[in-house]
């Protein structure tokens, strides 16, 4: 008998969108019960395409946004209520997933009555320690169910619209507790790339 294994061909993405999200107040230190807001505003239904360096019209699409609060140092392990809550401006729980060393959230925007891509999510701190707020890598973009024409395969990813990602807060953790040089470099690169923001909760 002859067995053959083959890999699926890589997806050819038409657009790799890159967008910036604001964070406020952007501080080094917070307290339990404080809220930091992550906000995205899109006024023209266009996304910045990394492939063409142009803003591309992208109406009636479903976009995902994924964010997590990751425990790094002097934190609880797997707290029953998570490390944080994610809330809307109206104070409604925005959903979350719990983990031993982090609490995350993913939400979909773009489809519905308004077809708006704008969002604002609050992160309410519940545990002490040093953390990073991490943004996900590339996420798939899909057409809304009522869209007439299929939208070509595309992705979207976000970075923080910040000058400083608080690398000094991360460096206040002893190197051994950062997982050694290799693990430390990975987090440093995320902070430098504005994909992670370090903070302290007291």
Image (cartoon, rainbow, N blue to C red):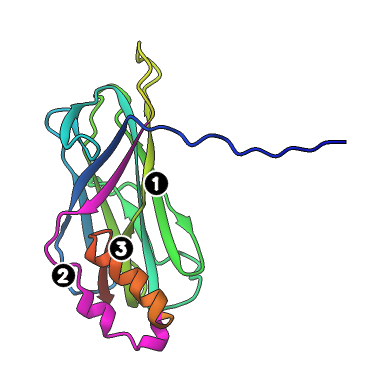
Q: What residue range appears in magenta?
A: 154-178
Q: Mark 3 packing: few (<14 Cα in 10 Å), some, or many (20+)?
A: many
- Is residue 110 among what the camera can see? yes
Q: Is residue 158 above or below residue 133?
A: above
If the image is split into quadrants, where does the N terminus sit? top right
Crowd tier of the residue under label 1, counting other residues whose Cα lies within 10 Å: few below 14, some 14–19, many 20 or above: some
CA gap, disc 1 and disc 2: 24 Å
Is the residue 79 above or below the residue 158 in the image?
below
Residue at 20% from the left image edge and 67% from the top image edge: 165
Q: Nearer the viewer, residue 51 or 60?
A: 51
Picture coordinates of residue 77 (x, y %)?
49, 75
73 above or below 112? below
Q: Are marks 1 and 2 in contact (CB under 8 Å)?
A: no
User: As rendered, which of 16 and 148 lies closer to the eye?
Assistant: 16
Q: Name which residue lies at 24% across and 74% down.
A: 31
Q: Nearer the viewer, residue 197 or 13?
A: 13
Q: Is residue 83 left or right of residue 201?
A: right
Where is residue 169? Give x, y as percent.
23, 79
Q: Quadrant of the C terminus?
A: bottom left
**Residue lying furthest right:** 1
The residue that mark 1 highlights is: 106
Give the x, y percent position of residue 128: 34, 77
**Mark 2 Cα-neighbour bin, 10 Å: few <14, some 14–19, many ≥20:** some
C-alpha distance separating marks 3 and 1: 13 Å
Query: Counting residues from the N terminus, which is met first, the one under dot 3 or under dot 1?
Result: 1
> For residue 27, which numbered disc appears in the image?
2
- Asked if residue 26 is among those painted magenta in the image, a careful observer would answer no
Of the image marks 2 and 3, the number of the one nearer the N terminus: 2
Local secondary structure at mark 1: strand
Q: Which residue does the numbered mark 3 point to in the structure image?
A: 133
């Amino acid at each position: 008998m002859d067995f053959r294994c083959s890999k699926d061909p890589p997806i050819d993405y038409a657009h790799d969108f890159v967008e910036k999200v604001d964070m406020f107040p952007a501080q080094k230190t917070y307290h339990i019960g404080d809220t930091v807001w992550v906000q995205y505003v899109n006024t023209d239904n266009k996304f910045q395409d990394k492939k063409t360096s142009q803003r591309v019209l992208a109406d009636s699409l479903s976009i995902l946004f994924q964010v997590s609060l990751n425990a790094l140092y002097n934190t609880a392990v797997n707290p029953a209520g998570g490390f944080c809550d994610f809330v809307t401006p109206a104070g409604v729980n925005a959903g979350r997933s719990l983990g031993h060393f982090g609490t995350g959230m993913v939400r979909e925007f773009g489809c519905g009555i308004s077809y708006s891509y704008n969002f604002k999510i609050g992160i309410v701190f519940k545990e002490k320690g040093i953390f990073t707020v991490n943004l996900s890598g590339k996420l798939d973009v899909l057409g809304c169910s009522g869209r007439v024409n299929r939208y070509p395969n595309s992705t979207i990813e976000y970075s923080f619209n910040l000058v400083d990602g608080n690398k000094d807060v991360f460096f206040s953790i002893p190197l051994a507790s950062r997982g050694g040089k290799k693990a430390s470099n990975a987090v440093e690169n995320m902070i430098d790339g504005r994909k992670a923001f370090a903070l302290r909760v007291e």
